[in-house]
Image: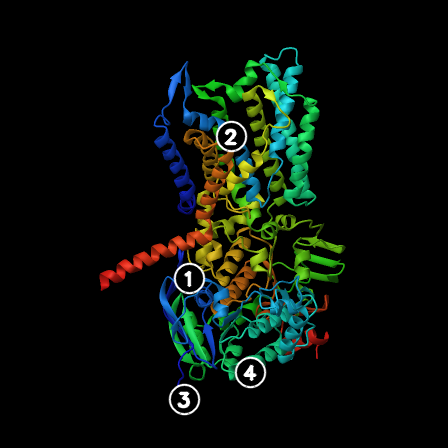
């Protein structure tokens, strides 16, 4: 199985490496990392740090997509959780105290769970198509965030809260560590238990899974809750990084980046087999692209076009039709060589 | 008889899938105006060979000539354009469209850029009339039975001006009259010079209709024979490659194990169990170690009953007692918890999880029962998989192979392994041998008997009455969604069961 997965991940890895090489050519100091005041700095560190929220959201999205679903509401959940945490901290008499921050973070994550339960309820119990079910929260969620912030951009000055998105630990940005820990937990939770296989089974053939006694309803519910929690953490990270909650712009379009990361990583939107490692690489490709645009000096007006070209290239290279063509080409070449020897 | 040039000439065809060598240097030819049967067990490579000919799979090595010219196609559409059309085992039609639309799909009559529906419909009607099929071309395909849908698929294939017509298990869901009808059509097409490739597991049909046979085994060519020159027993021998005495052995064993069951509590007892619109209230008991055969036509209620007993559908009338205790089965999961396993007749849609490995498929039900948190240790999974692969002779014997790359019969065995792994008390097998060759069929039948000897109850559903009679201790006959008979299987004849199915009385 790992051989297949490795095969699947060839093109995303090639793309990522190519992008990194391009950056080094243009900017030879690209890989250099320096230690300053006990903190690591450098382009690579920036990519990892800025990519952390996308990685988190894409992580949850991977499992949702593996069950044949999709979660469009993650951007809204990012906004809601950031808004709740910031407004709680701003309203507290001691915004700088650790307990206030813990309370705010806890409350936001509980809210994320509730939002995930809502999505899961609509999809798995009521049976609404995932794209529609999560569209509801995608649109309503921004309003909910506005309600919490009362239409204002809430800024907070709280040292402990700043740690989540902008702090350092062991000279690494805390956001990278948080994303890494979440990734590790997810990988262990899905692959060391049977959750991963059951998710894939439900995604590939829901009917057969039901007859085999798989509790598809609770599995589907779980992945939506998980996705919401991932988005919630990402929301805390984003608002902490800018020390403000912006109901309108926090996590805007992050759902699309996340879906893209999943697809680039080789997980099919039709559900079934998924690859967390692929998603991770996909998320880094997207983040590296954004950075590349700046280092290479592409005018900001065409940034999106450049991004699109790279994405199309990766998706094309992974498509079954293209793969078959590549295989055929290789085979023909091998045959030609053989016949040449025979003659 | 002087031989014309073959219309299809395949030489040295090899195709490999990850972990499976599906075809290994196979030669195959077809002549115009001849029916050629492709014979072999599950996994012999029949389907793969057909898919190579129709452009579904690219061949790794080998050469295909059509009318003496090299054929290079990479899609079924191109195969059709070249004059090769196919009717697959599972009907590949669009049930939400009308009969006419299905027949004419992709080659509708045109008036400029628009479709001329009137003409399209009348062409479809002509085609149906030409085959003297009395089907309303404007009716929705979904309103027809599977058998009629099959005939529509054949009409569609014939409608394409075909040089080569491939019929893959066309008769597996047809009744005797429909088969006769199909054969009439095949004979007519033969006369007009079409080369027909016929695949069926019914030996009688093969001998009735075909002129020539090619036998495959394990992806290799065994030989090509004229039907007149090879005896049935020789043929079976060539297909299986081992002595065929299993079937005879079976009969003696069954009869002796039917015990007196008067005083025992049945493992499963249905009292007036029914569901509006699908099954009239029914009484049924299945005792420990008993094989109960469920006979009846397609749509007679046999599958509906199985679904009620397994929690796949909810009963809305009557009571179900399991081991003497009244039970409500809300889901298949709750049935599995009470040790009732149901193997659906619909292998592809409700059975296998095709993108997972053989191992994952085998342990799926067991794992589902344990819940996601308590994963079956990898070592135990491997033990389970290897032992079932060995016991059921699953090919390829590779637990990591994806189930989608297995042949139908081997997929069926993987499913059996999945249900056996949960150690059920009642195993409901719905058409476990459909579309399966003699060898695998005998293996599955033998398994059923062994399981019953070990105390497992089996509800055995099959359209093949010989099989039901051979295996069952008791036979329940269904007709028009009702139970019409419940008889001990001693000296019951095929004729009796047939007349029960046909008229509800023992003639």
> What distance separates the C-alpha of mark 1 from that of mark 2?
43 Å
Q: CA distance from mark 3 to mark 1?
A: 35 Å
Numbered circle sitting on residue B58: 1
Residue A52, position in %: x, y?
Answer: 50, 29
Write the residue at 51% across / 67% down: B436
- Identify which residue, B435 or B184, lies in the foreground: B184
Query: How far, Cα to Cα, is label 3 from label 2?
Result: 76 Å
Q: Which residue is mark 3?
A: B1
Whether tag 3 and tag 1 are in contact, CB under 8 A, the answer is: no
In screen coordinates, is B79 left or right of A340?
A: right
- Residue at x-position 57% and y-position 56%: B351
Q: Position of residue B253 (x, y in %)?
A: 53, 68
Q: Are marks 4 and 1 on the same chain?
A: yes
Of circles 1 and 2, which is in front? 1
Label number found at residue A182: 2
Measured as percent of width and height from the top left, residue B40 is found at 45, 70
Q: Is residue A306 above or below residue A144?
A: below
Question: Is B112 drawn above or below residue A312 in the view shown?
Answer: below
């Amino acid at each position: 199985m790992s051989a297949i997965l490795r095969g699947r991940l060839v093109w995303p890895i090639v793309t990522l490496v190519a992008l990194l090489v391009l950056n080094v050519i243009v900017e030879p100091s690209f890989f250099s990392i320096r230690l300053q005041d006990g903190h690591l700095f450098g382009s690579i560190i920036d990519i990892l740090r800025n990519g952390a929220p996308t990685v988190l959201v894409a992580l949850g999205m991977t499992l949702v997509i593996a069950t044949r679903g999709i979660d469009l509401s993650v951007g809204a959940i990012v906004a809601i959780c950031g808004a709740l945490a910031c407004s709680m901290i701003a309203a507290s008499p001691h915004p700088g105290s650790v307990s206030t921050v813990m309370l705010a973070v806890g409350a936001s994550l509980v809210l994320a769970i509730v939002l995930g339960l809502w999505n899961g309820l609509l999809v798995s119990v009521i049976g609404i198509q995932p794209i529609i079910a999560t569209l509801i929260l995608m649109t309503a969620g921004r309003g909910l965030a506005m309600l919490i912030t009362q239409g204002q951009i809430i800024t907070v000055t709280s040292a402990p809260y700043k740690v989540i998105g902008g702090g350092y630990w062991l000279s690494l940005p805390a956001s990278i560590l948080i994303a890494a820990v979440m990734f590790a937990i997810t990988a262990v939770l899905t692959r060391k238990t049977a959750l991963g296989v059951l998710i894939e089974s439900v995604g590939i053939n829901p009917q057969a899974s039901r007859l085999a006694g798989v509790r598809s309803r609770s599995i589907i519910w779980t992945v939506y809750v998980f996705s919401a929690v991932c988005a919630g953490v990402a929301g805390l990270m984003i608002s902490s990084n800018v020390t403000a909650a912006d109901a309108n712009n926090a996590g805007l379009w992050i759902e699309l980046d996340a879906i893209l990361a999943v697809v680039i990583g080789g997980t099919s939107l039709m559900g079934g087999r998924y690859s967390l490692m692929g998603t991770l690489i996909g998320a880094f490709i997207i983040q590296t692209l954004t950075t590349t645009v700046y280092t290479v000096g592409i005018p900001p007006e065409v940034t999106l076009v450049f991004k699109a070209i790279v994405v199309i290239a990766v998706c094309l290279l992974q498509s079954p039709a293209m793969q078959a063509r590549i295989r055929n080409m290789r085979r023909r070449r091998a045959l030609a060589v053989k016949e040449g020897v025979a003659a | 008889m002087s031989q014309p040039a073959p219309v299809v000439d395949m030489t040295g065809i090899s195709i490999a899938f990850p972990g499976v060598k599906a075809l290994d240097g196979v030669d195959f030819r077809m002549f115009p105006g001849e029916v050629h049967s492709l014979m072999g067990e599950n996994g012999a490579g029949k389907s793969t060979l057909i898919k190579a000919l129709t452009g579904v799979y690219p061949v790794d090595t080998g050469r295909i000539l059509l009318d003496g010219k090299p054929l290079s196609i990479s899609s079924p559409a191109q195969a059709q354009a070249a004059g090769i059309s196919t009717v697959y085992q599972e009907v590949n039609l669009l049930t939400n469209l009308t009969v006419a639309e299905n027949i004419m799909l992709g080659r509708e009559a045109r008036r400029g850029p628009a479709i001329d529906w009137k003409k399209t419909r009348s062409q479809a009607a002509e085609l149906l009339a030409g085959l003297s099929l009395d089907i309303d071309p404007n009716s929705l395909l979904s309103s027809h039975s599977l058998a009629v849908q099959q005939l529509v698929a054949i009409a569609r294939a014939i409608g394409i001006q075909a040089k080569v017509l491939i019929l893959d298990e066309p008769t597996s869901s047809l009744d005797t009259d429909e088969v006769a009808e199909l054969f009439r059509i095949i004979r007519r097409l033969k006369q007009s010079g079409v080369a027909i490739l016929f695949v069926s597991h019914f030996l009688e049909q093969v001998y009735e209709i075909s002129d020539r046979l090619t036998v495959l085994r394990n992806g290799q060519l065994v030989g090509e024979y004229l039907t007149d020159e090879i005896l049935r027993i020789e043929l079976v021998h060539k297909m299986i490659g081992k002595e065929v005495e299993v079937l005879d052995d079976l009969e003696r064993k069954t009869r002796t194990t039917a015990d007196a069951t008067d005083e025992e509590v049945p493992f499963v007892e249905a009292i007036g169990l029914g569901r509006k619109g699908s099954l009239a209230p029914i009484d049924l008991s299945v005792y420990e170690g008993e094989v109960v055969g469920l006979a009846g036509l397609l749509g007679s209620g046999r599958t509906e009953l199985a679904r009620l007993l397994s929690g796949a559908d909810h009963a809305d009338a009557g009571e179900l007692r399991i081991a003497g205790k009244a039970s409500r089965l809300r889901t298949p999961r709750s049935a599995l918890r009470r040790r009732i396993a149901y193997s659906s007749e619909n292998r592809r849609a409700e059975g296998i999880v095709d993108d997972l490995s053989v191992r994952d498929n085998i342990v799926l039900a067991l794992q589902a029962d344990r819940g996601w948190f308590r994963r079956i240790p990898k070592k135990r999974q491997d033990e389970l998989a290897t032992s079932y692969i060995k016991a059921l002779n699953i090919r390829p014997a590779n637990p990591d192979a994806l189930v989608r790359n297995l042949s139908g019969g081997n997929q069926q065995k993987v499913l059996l392994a999945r249900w056996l792994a949960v150690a059920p008390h009642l195993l409901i097998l719905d058409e476990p041998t459909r579309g399966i060759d003699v060898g695998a069929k005998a293996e599955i039948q033998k398994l059923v008997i062994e399981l019953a000897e070990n105390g497992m109850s089996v509800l055995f559903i099959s359209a093949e009455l010989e099989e039901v009679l051979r295996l069952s201790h008791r036979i329940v006959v269904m007709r028009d969604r009702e139970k019409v008979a419940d008889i001990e299987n001693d000296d019951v004849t095929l004729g009796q069961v047939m007349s029960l199915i046909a008229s509800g009385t023992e003639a």
